[in-house]
Image: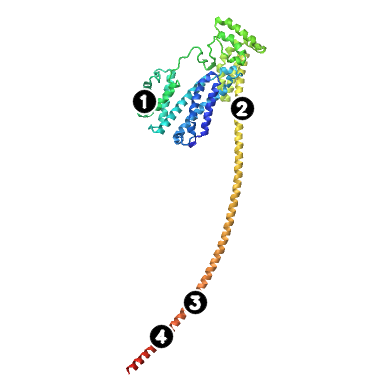
């Protein structure tokens, strides 16, 4: 593409969007909203693939449009890569090998942020493509400029305030009262310093952007948080977020009694929904657990028996270590933070006993697995870079070889030209000598001719004098003869 944009990069972006939304389909339900947003972005990108590949497309004729489109797609790529990384990190949640700690570390807030980012990219891309189409047909006077981008930022801020339920920003549904909503947003834009004429020039594009936000639910006030996690499947305490798959919040006693069975269940049972135990259902629940324990293998029974005595203490340890585990996850960025968190965790294990040591070891093992995974990725990237370097070295050697061959050919051509020049010089010198010799001969001949002409002139002068003398003598004789005749005739 012109102005530095690559069609191949755009095709790879489409493939990335397709990969992410397909990955979300095989992930836990918490990925559904982000997956739908990724699919929406994929649909838009795929629909304009033909236009991107067309050299006559309006997107490829204007440098400013290409730069804006490149910036939009770059932002889309960053968000999609972020979602792809989350899918890869938590891919074990959809397999039979998932670990209990993976459930505790599902980044629901990150998924919500990614979904919001993808929705924003869809709206911006839709408005941009609509604006490009309007400009192409000559139906608008203005262009998408820095002022329009600023308006979108103001609208996004207002949308965030509406979703947060900030006082004074609650508005009616956009689809039911579009005129009133437009007036309110227009007043906010004017209050932000934008001129009325500038807002009017982008009115249709802004309205389309607001419709897209309304369809995505970005103009709806967020519902109040519930005491349980039945709708969201998430229970948050401080900085710790724990996955609970569509079940009400358990009491401390119920979780204490049921935690050993949860820990003792095989991985396939970890995906089943956990049912809340009430005092009335306690006996029935105990019977069900006894039946479940009887169905387990001898090894799992022994494991359940060993952990049952530690379940209550382990639950307290888990709650106390929530912040520490989050700190360990965030500490992966630097070795100093990682070392400090490990030291804190080690000190905590010394104080609180061997039970926490096993929990911390599990967390350390998880971190070690992540580090090993990162190391593997780094080694693969290094191998790829080394292969690329070797390819570049081979290409450089080939270029050097071609340069030597071309230098040899050029040297041969120079020698041939030098030889031809020398031959031409010799021939020219010989021709010059012959010309000089011929000139000398011509000069001698000219001198001789001049001498001969002088002699001939002298001879001619002598002959002329002689003729003149003869004529004078003849004239005198003629006069004498005429005089004699006249005298004779008179007589």
- The mark that comes first in sequence, 2 or 4, is 2
Count of marks placed on residues: 4
- In terms of depth relative to the viewer, which is nearer, 38 or 299? 38
Secondary structure, mark 2, is helix
Secondary structure, mark 4, is helix
**Residue 486 rendering spot, x and y as whole percentages:** 34, 91
- Left or right: residue 210 compared with residue 27: left
- The mark that comes first in sequence, 3 or 2, is 2
Tell me the CA gap for discs 4 and 3.
28 Å
Q: Which mark is residue 471?
A: 4
Tell me the CA gap for discs 3 and 2.
110 Å
- Left or right: residue 260 compared with residue 80: right
Figure quadrant of the C terminus: bottom left
Q: Is residue 245 above or below residue 475?
A: above
Q: For the view shown, which residue lies furthest in the front direction? A: 489
- The mark that comes first in sequence, 4 or 1, is 1
Per the image, the residue denoted by label 3 is: 452
Secondary structure, mark 3, is helix
Tell me the CA gap for discs 4 and 1.
130 Å
Tell me the CA gap for discs 3 and 1.
114 Å
Per the image, the residue denoted by label 1 is: 190
Residue at 61% from the left image edge and 30% from the top image edge? 380
Give the foreground label among 4 and 3.
Answer: 4
- The mark that comes first in sequence, 3 or 1, is 1
């Amino acid at each position: 593409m012109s102005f530095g944009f690559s069609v191949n990069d755009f095709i790879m972006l489409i493939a990335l969007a397709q990969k992410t939304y397909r990955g979300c389909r095989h992930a836990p339900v918490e990925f559904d909203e982000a997956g739908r947003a990724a699919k929406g972005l994929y649909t838009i990108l795929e629909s304009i693939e033909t236009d991107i590949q067309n050299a006559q497309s309006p997107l490829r004729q204007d440098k400013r449009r290409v730069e804006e489109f490149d910036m939009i797609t770059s932002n889309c790529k960053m968000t999609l890569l972020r979602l792809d990384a989350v899918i890869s990190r938590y891919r074990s949640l959809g397999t039979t090998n998932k670990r209990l700690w993976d459930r505790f570390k599902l980044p629901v807030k990150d998924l919500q942020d990614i979904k919001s980012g993808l929705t924003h990219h869809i709206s911006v891309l839709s408005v941009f493509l609509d604006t490009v189409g309007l400009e192409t047909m000559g139906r608008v006077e203005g262009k998408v400029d820095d002022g329009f981008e600023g308006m979108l930022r103001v609208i996004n801020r207002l949308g965030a305030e509406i979703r947060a339920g900030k006082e004074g920003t609650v508005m009616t549904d956009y689809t039911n009262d579009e005129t009133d909503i437009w007036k309110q947003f227009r007043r906010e834009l004017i209050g932000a310093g934008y001129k009325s004429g500038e807002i009017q020039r982008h009115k249709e594009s802004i309205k389309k952007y607001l419709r897209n936000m309304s369809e995505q639910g970005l103009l709806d006030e967020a519902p109040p948080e519930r005491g349980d996690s039945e709708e969201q499947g998430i229970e948050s305490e401080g900085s710790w977020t724990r996955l609970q798959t569509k079940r009400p919040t358990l009491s401390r006693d119920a979780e204490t009694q049921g935690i050993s069975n949860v820990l003792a269940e095989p991985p396939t049972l970890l995906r089943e929904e956990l049912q809340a135990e009430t005092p009335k259902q306690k006996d029935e629940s105990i019977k069900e657990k006894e039946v479940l324990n009887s169905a387990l293998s001898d090894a799992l029974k022994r494991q359940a028996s060993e952990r049952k005595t530690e379940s209550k203490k382990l639950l307290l340890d888990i709650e106390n270590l929530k912040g520490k585990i989050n700190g360990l996850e965030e500490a992966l960025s630097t070795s100093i933070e990682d070392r400090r968190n490990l030291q804190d965790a080690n000190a905590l294990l010394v104080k609180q006993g061997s039970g926490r040591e096993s929990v911390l070891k599990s967390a350390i093992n998880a971190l070690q697995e992540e580090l090993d995974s990162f190391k593997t990725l780094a080694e693969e990237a290094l191998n790829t870079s080394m292969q690329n370097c070797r390819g570049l070295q081979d290409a450089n050697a080939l270029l050097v070889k071609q340069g030597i061959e071309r230098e040899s050919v050029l040297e041969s051509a120079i020698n041939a030209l030098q030889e031809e020049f020398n031959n031409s010089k010799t021939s020219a010198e010989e021709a010059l000598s012959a010309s000089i010799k011929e000139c000398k001969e011509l000069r001698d001949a000219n001198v001789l001719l001049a001498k001969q002409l002088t002699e001939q002139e002298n001879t001619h002068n002598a002959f002329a004098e002689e003729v003149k003398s003869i004529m004078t003598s003849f004239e005198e004789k003629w006069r004498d003869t005429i005089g004699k005749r006249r005298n004779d005739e008179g007589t």
